Image (cartoon, rainbow, N blue to C red):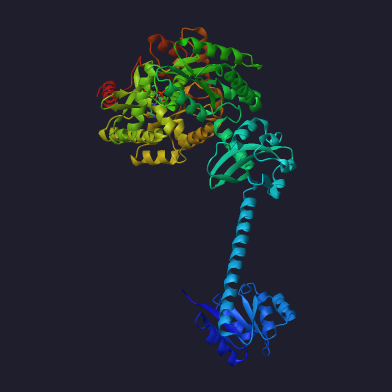
Amino acid sequence: MNKKTLLAVDDAEINRKILSKLFSNEFDVIEACDGKEAFDILVKRDGDIDIIILDIIMPTYDGFYFLEKIKNSAEYNNVPVVIATTDNSPEAEAKLLDLGATDLIYKPFNPQNAVKRVKAILARYEAETQKIKSASSLENRHNIVMRQTNTFSAEYDFETGKTFIDPTYSNYVHRDFCNIDIFDATSMIGLIYRPDLDAVVSFLNINEVSETTQRFINVRILTDNNIYEWFRLALAIHFENGVKTRAILTFNNINSEMEAIKKLEIFSSIDRLTKIPNRNTFVEKTQTIIEENEDSKFAIVRFDIESFKIINQLFGTAEGDSILKFIAVKLQEIIEPIKNATYCRITSDLFAFSIPYDNEDLLNTVIDTLVAAVKMYPLNFDITLSFGIYIAENSEYSVRHMLDRAGVAQKATKNNYKTHISYFDEALREQEEIEITIVSEMKKALEKGEFKIYLQPKCDMRTGKIIGSEALVRWVHPTKGLISPRSFIPIFENNGFITELDYYIFSTVSELISKWRDDGLPILPVSVNVSRADLYDPNLFPNIVKIVDKYNIPHEYIEFELTESSFISDNHKLCDLTYNLQKSNFHVLMDDFGSGYSSLNSLKDIKVDVLKIDINFLPTSTTDERAGKILASVVSMANDLDLKVVVEGVETRDQADFLISIGAYEAQGYYFFKPMPVEDYEKALKAQLDL
Ligand code: C2E
Ligand code: CA
Ligand code: CA
């Protein structure tokens, strides 16, 4: 064991020598000749002096000076100081002890006793400070922990039967708490939130407890503000020799945590607007129910309000919100009583529910009740719901996937004015399979050149002569054969791939025209389609110019077919693009004229060169007088505006004759030509020119 260090302070060298000799067996002794030197040593040997023997009477810096200095210093006041003195009067002793001396020894020293005495003083001192140190730091730590964790405690002594409550309790709970008996829950009636009381009674029942244990419970306790707040109670029972000695009950106020958790729970499981379960909750619950009922079928239904956007625009979003809340309440009323049924609001005006499905009866009843309930909403507008249904026969697919399938079915109702209910059927399943193939293979297909151009000639109906063509893309799939653009273009428009594909088509068409020029073939304009999704590429126009100019062909050979959109913001982009294209000598066609809501309106702003009217967008056949009149007036309006007209979808001679009679001469339709591979188009053109 290391020797302790003793500092001997005495102005008389002889005394220092005596002290050194006496203590050197037990201590490393350092000598100082006065109070000042002693203090310097103390500072220099920072923390390394275990005890000091101090002479009082010294010249200049005496013992009093040193004692005062050391007791006033925060760093060294814990070093024990033993005074070596000749004055054994009680007054002198009292004075020195008051000044902070740890103890006194008397000169002249008795060699044996002096050392023993000093050692005893040191041991006692260390034991005491150790106790104080640990006691005070424990108390401090305890208090800090209690304060920081919003905790107070109560202690029960089984021997005396007395309860001690930490006085800080009044910061947390009602003042009546001082009267409680820890193990008598009835003494807490009124203080504990009534619904929690039973749980507290059994929590406090320790009859069965036979060894040191700890248990926890969360309860609501009355505070001095007369509100109930959440506390976590921890009960520790201590045993000694098989007998209960103490019980410590700590009360930890966890109200803010509980509030936060509650909020979190609400936000993550409940839809904020309608207060019914949200999509996550629905998916989770439904998943469990389906898995637990492997042998049962379920109908997973998605529904929304038709034209909800328009309702919002007409009546305001507050009214829109109110309708959503109304539907949520009705949905809850209808679904809640059904066993193993779930429901939710997905987002916006989209809701879902799942019910057991033995046959259509229950499902039909639910839908009919819901539709009837919604009809009762007081609004000067017919609120129509459209439903997509997926029948789950097992849990092979996730509920999310089932919801997606219900969504696919629901979309199918959108193009159908007669029915608002549609099932996910075999045809949609095949469609889904195609979609999966399409998305997973599209990039490779483009690289491998599987996207081919077909050209559909446009002709003058009076002569039947080809005057140009439209490039229509086809996917020549190695195993699935020819895939129609109607099955992949909408998917590409959704995932953005359409822009890449359109650039490829622009480039291929430009290359084709440059080839015709090189081969000495007559060149007729070819139109290409610009998807509305392309408008979101900020470099669309410069890219078009770059692509076409790479082949060094006159711009008037390429025409761009644009479709108007029902969104005003898109129309600004459409307007800019039209302007830029025309400035660069490209022709612009308004495709599918008459299909949108604002066709006539947009003509005001977007000054295209050609109107493409799809004859199939007219309500009925052209033999219908009204439809004919509409078509005739559109054609005459176009003539007035100096717009060329091309009529698409001409399938019969009758249609062609009628169109000629109203002054529309150019057509693109199966009656004249179907879309064809490039080689066939070239042949047809050569035949026409007798080449
Ligand atoms: P669209 O631009 O309106 O093209 C005309 C569509 O009508 C073509 O369908 C054409 O084959 C079809 N059609 C032509 N004559 C008749 C007829 O007499 N009767 C009937 N019932 N249909 C006729 P297709 O080739 O299936 O293309 C469908 C749509 O796909 C196109 O409609 C266009 O919107 C889009 N599309 C085709 N190719 C491209 C492309 O390269 N890029 C973009 N963005 N869209 C394309
Ligand atoms: Ca087109
Ligand atoms: Ca068209």
Q: x and y percent of residue 219 in the render?
A: 63, 37
Q: Closer to the camera, 392 or 20?
A: 20
Q: Residue at x 74, y 38 (%)?
A: 226
Q: Residue at x 53, y 40 (%)?
A: 210
Q: x and y percent of residue 30 in the render?
A: 54, 84
**Which quadrant of the figure contains the C terminus?**
top left
Q: x and y percent of residue 350 in the render?
A: 53, 24
Q: x and y percent of residue 535 in the render?
A: 47, 35
Left/right placement of residue 326 relative to residue 466 reads right
Task: Give the image quadrant in which the ligand numbered 2 is located.
Answer: top left
Left/right placement of residue 57 relative to residue 205 reads right
Above or below, 11 relative to 467: below
Above or below, 598 relative to 31: above
Q: Is residue 469 visible?
A: no
- Where, by quadrant of the figure, is residue 490 drawn? top left
- How many marks on residues? 0
Q: Residue at x 50, y 35 (%)?
A: 579
Q: Is residue 141 visible?
A: yes
